[in-house]
């Protein structure tokens, strides 16, 4: 069974923006819970409230769909469609007030990503994409530029802050920093959509979860960013993105170190 992906995109973009407003309104009164997988894996009551808002609305609109959600509000479905939800990608930035974060929602039919939304609350920017239908920023078309030489490239770096992944990230940064223009550490979804918007020339993400990268990956791909890792597509272990002219050299450098 197919569905109207444009209508779905518009509905969940509104949900993401509502969650973003909640996050801005409650930032001064948030409560941080116990760490999850490791000491740097933090969660707040705002993460949980944001996910509840999004998942409740998705269940009401599409009761037969499955949901994969970071903070535990997932469920099985029978329709063959799955919603992938990260209600607050970049919780550490949000809590510490040291950088951007986003609300991420993607829709997958079987194993194919079909629609995605990434909303950045502070900037009021909503990135979106429809499979085969292009990428958008606040409703306007989004096409990544061709790229720059490696020595001028601004490269985003994203990774889970557990001890083993930090060791991997350190190897990659040691390899890249002398040969690129500069690097930026960002949450994975914003890393990918900033490539789509031409704010970054390339980027990589190490040891993420599907909800961290699914929405951003579809938006980047639809804007013309080349994606891959140790295989021909994005993966939770390693995702490399770059403008087409930069891809061969950047991906070679990252794969050698990661």
Image (cartoon, helix red, strand yellow):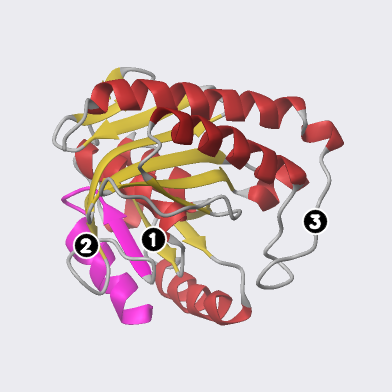
- Which quarter of the picture shows residue 51? top right
Q: Earlier in the sequence, mark 3 or mark 2?
A: 3
Mark 3–mark 2 distance (CA, rounded to whole Å): 35 Å
- The reply to whether discs 3 and 1 touch (Cβ–Cβ < 8 Å) is no
- The reply to whether discs 2 and 1 touch (Cβ–Cβ < 8 Å) is no
Q: Earlier in the sequence, mark 2 or mark 1?
A: 1
What is the span of residues highlighted in magenta in the rendered image? Answer: 238-258
Q: Which residue is mark 2?
A: 233
Q: Secondary structure at mark 2?
A: loop
Seen in the image, is 243 located left or right of residue 171? Answer: left
- Which quarter of the picture shows residue 58? top left
Q: Where does residue 98 sit, x and y in percent of width and height?
A: 70, 44
Query: Residue at the spot x=39%, y=37% of the render?
Result: 199
Q: Is 246 contained in the magenta span?
A: yes
Q: Which residue is mark 1?
A: 204
Mark 2–mark 1 distance (CA, rounded to whole Å): 12 Å
Q: Residue furthest left?
A: 132
Eyeballing the image, is 205 above or below 254? above
Q: Please tell me which residue lies in front, 162 or 77.
A: 77
Q: Secondary structure at mark 3?
A: loop
Mark 3–mark 1 distance (CA, rounded to whole Å): 29 Å
Q: Secondary structure at mark 1?
A: strand
Q: Which residue is mark 3?
A: 33
Q: Where does residue 154 sit, x and y in percent of width and height?
A: 40, 49
Q: Is residue 219 visible?
A: yes
Query: Residue at the spot x=47%, y=30% of the render?
Result: 60
Q: Where does residue 73 sit, x and y in percent of width and height?
A: 57, 50
Q: Where does residue 247 sit, x and y in percent of width and height?
A: 21, 58
Q: Earlier in the sequence, mark 3 or mark 1?
A: 3
């Amino acid at each position: 069974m197919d569905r109207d992906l444009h209508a779905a995109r518009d509905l969940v973009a509104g949900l993401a923006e509502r969650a973003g407003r909640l996050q801005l309104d409650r930032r001064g009164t948030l409560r941080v819970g116990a760490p999850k997988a490791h000491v740097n894996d933090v969660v707040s009551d705002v993460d949980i409230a944001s996910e509840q808002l999004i998942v409740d609305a998705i269940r009401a609109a599409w009761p037969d769909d499955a949901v994969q959600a970071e903070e535990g509000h997932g469920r099985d479905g029978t329709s063959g469609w799955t919603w992938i939800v990260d209600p607050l990608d970049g919780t550490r930035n949000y809590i510490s007030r040291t950088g951007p974060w986003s609300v991420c929602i993607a829709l997958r039919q079987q194993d194919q990503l079909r629609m995605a939304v990434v909303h950045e609350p502070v900037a009021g920017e909503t990135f979106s994409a429809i499979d085969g239908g292009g990428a958008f920023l606040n409703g306007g078309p989004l096409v990544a530029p061709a790229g720059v030489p490696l020595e001028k490239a601004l490269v985003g770096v994203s990774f889970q802050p557990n001890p083993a992944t930090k060791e991997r990230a350190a190897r990659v940064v040691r390899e890249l920093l002398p040969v690129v223009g500069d690097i930026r550490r960002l949450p994975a979804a914003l890393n990918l959509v900033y490539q789509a918007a031409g704010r970054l020339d390339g980027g990589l993400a190490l040891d993420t979860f599907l909800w961290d990268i699914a929405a951003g990956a579809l938006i980047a791909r639809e804007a013309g960013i080349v994606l891959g890792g140790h295989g021909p597509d994005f993966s939770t272990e390693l995702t490399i993105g770059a403008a087409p002219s930069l891809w061969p050299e950047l991906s070679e450098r990252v794969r050698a170190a990661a």
